[in-house]
């Protein structure tokens, strides 16, 4: 029997769930559907189906987030394909297919966005098993979600009828309300889930028919890729030369071998705050609340709070409070959150991309205060982790150890600091911070100078490939 290779697509930015999801830390890395993050839940859902480790396609900037979150749940060591630029799903899946074919095998690729919620994972696994014979026979199978309402936010797939994987008659764009109601009544239309099952070779063959330029560009990007442990860095010049297109447009709408398997597993793509409200447990008044929330005479609302938030006399609203931004919206207008993100980007405001707490491969920093010529950060360094050997042109730094042990390189000297000890790094002095201990290192950093931007870093050595 052909092996099953799960392919986790993790390239999205999740802007419709701002301010919780942001470009540098998007929704697939957040625990929106339970205790696990969404990428962790995606792997757990498919792990019983396969003996192969995950193959992940991710944004270059998210490489350490993917690796760390899979490590946390003890997933088998993954292969992580890094996209240097976004080119939509067709090239991303082509890279995964060509990578899977490198060792001479031809596995079935189970292609899954890593930011969906499925409330019945066993039913999903049963559906995958049901689709395997068609995929092994050469079909390109997509999973069509049985619609529960006349949804206008999804594309639809019309099936030809029968049992199991059915022939696809056509793909249709997001309909208006009247058309969606007709699709629901007819019973032969399914929501397009964006999940697929096919042999790696079959996908490449079909893509070659319809877009040989894309296959050639992706193949070259993989041949020229730099391989660094778990990471496969696709060549930027070659991958950029690929046309940008979705798998639906590039292959599924054109191939004669497309089939759709109806899926009724409690699926939700969590594409908006109202969608998250739908899949979250609610109180007697229909409110879904996370954090320290008080609701009085409030109904059918979603509230996320990182500090105390109280709602009085409000219905059908979304309130999301983080440490540096607050969103208040009517639940029926949350799709317009993307306009907020567009405005933030236009104004070049950091809240479009970064949270106040920023994760790095060595740990994280939290900017807890800032003024005209100073900034205060709380820095956490993981056990055994090391920051780059670096220098700043415009700022000096004071480091005060709160807990743990810090090994500090300052110019030509190396010193050890423990709790309540401190050091000063003058402007222009080469320095490095390391945690040599087995416990997290926490320290307070006070920066002072004429410019405090993150781009004022000159790296001389870096174990994470950023120098």
Image (cartoon, rainbow, N blue to C red):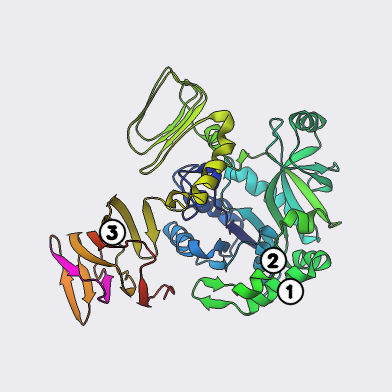
Q: Give residue 70's mark.
A: none
Assign a secondary structure to mark 1.
helix
Q: Farthest bottom residue?
A: 412
Q: Is residue 225 left or right of residue 324?
A: right
Taking the magenta stretch, the answer to whether it contains residue 56 is: no
Real-space CA distance between mark 3 and mark 2, rounded to the nearest whole angstrom: 39 Å
Looking at the image, tell me whether mark 3 or mark 2 is earlier in sequence order.
2
Q: Which residues are magenta?
A: 421-434
Q: Residue at x 77, y 61 (%)?
A: 136
Q: Which residue is mark 1?
A: 216
Badge 1 density bin: few <14, some 14–19, many ≥20, Cα 10 Å:
some
Instruction: Decide which of 452, 432 is in the foreground and name it.
Output: 452
Q: Give residue 379's mark.
A: 3
Real-space CA distance between mark 1 and mark 3, rounded to the nearest whole angstrom: 44 Å
Q: Is residue 396 left or right of residue 231?
A: left
Q: Residue at x 58, y 37 (%)?
A: 336
Assign a secondary structure to mark 3.
strand
Badge 2 density bin: few <14, some 14–19, many ≥20, Cα 10 Å:
many
Query: What is the x, y in percent for residue 361?
Result: 39, 65
């Amino acid at each position: 029997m052909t092996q099953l290779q799960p392919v986790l697509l993790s390239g999205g930015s999740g802007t419709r769930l701002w301010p919780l999801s942001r470009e540098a830390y998007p929704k697939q890395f957040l625990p929106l559907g339970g205790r696990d993050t969404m990428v962790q839940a995606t792997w757990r859902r498919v792990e019983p189906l396969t003996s192969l480790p995950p193959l992940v396609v991710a944004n270059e900037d998210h490489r350490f987030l993917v690796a760390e979150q899979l490590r946390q749940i003890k997933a088998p060591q993954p292969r992580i394909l890094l996209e240097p630029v976004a080119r939509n799903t067709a090239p991303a899946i082509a890279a995964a297919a060509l990578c899977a074919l490198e060792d001479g095998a031809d596995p079935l690729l189970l292609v899954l966005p890593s930011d969906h919620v499925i409330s019945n994972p066993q039913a999903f696994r049963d559906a995958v098993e049901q689709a395997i014979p068609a995929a092994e026979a050469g079909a390109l199978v997509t999973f069509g979600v049985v619609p529960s309402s006349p949804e206008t936010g999804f594309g639809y797939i019309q099936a030809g009828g029968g049992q199991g994987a059915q022939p696809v008659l056509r793909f249709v764009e997001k309909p208006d309300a009247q058309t969606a109601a007709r699709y629901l009544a007819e019973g032969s239309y399914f929501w397009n889930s964006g999940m697929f099952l096919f042999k790696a070779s079959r996908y490449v063959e079909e893509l070659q028919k319809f877009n040989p330029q894309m296959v050639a560009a992706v193949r070259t990007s993989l041949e020229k890729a730099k391989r660094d442990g778990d990471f496969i860095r696709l060549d930027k010049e070659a991958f950029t030369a690929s046309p940008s297109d979705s798998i639906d447009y590039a292959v599924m709408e054109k191939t004669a071998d497309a089939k759709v398997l109806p899926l009724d597993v409690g699926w939700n793509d969590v594409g908006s705050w109202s969608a998250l409200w739908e899949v979250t447990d609610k109180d007697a008044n229909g409110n879904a609340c996370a954090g320290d929330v008080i609701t009085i005479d409030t109904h059918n609302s979603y509230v996320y709070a990182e500090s105390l938030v109280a709602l009085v006399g409000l219905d059908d609203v979304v309130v999301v409070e983080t440490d540096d931004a607050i969103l208040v919206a009517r639940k029926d207008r949350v799709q317009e959150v993307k306009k907020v993100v567009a405005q933030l980007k236009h104004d070049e405001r950091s809240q479009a991309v970064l949270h106040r707490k920023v994760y790095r491969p060595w740990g994280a920093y939290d900017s807890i205060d800032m003024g005209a010529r100073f900034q205060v950060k709380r820095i956490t360094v993981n056990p055994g982790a090391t920051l780059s050997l670096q220098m700043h042109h415009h700022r000096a730094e004071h480091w005060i150890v709160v807990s743990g042990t810090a090994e500090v390189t300052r110019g030509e000297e190396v010193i050890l600091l423990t709790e309540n000890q401190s050091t000063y790094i003058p402007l222009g002095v080469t320095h490095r911070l390391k945690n040599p201990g087995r416990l997290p290192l926490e320290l307070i950093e006070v920066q002072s100078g004429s410019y405090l931007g993150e781009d004022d870093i000159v790296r001389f050595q870096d174990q994470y490939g950023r120098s």
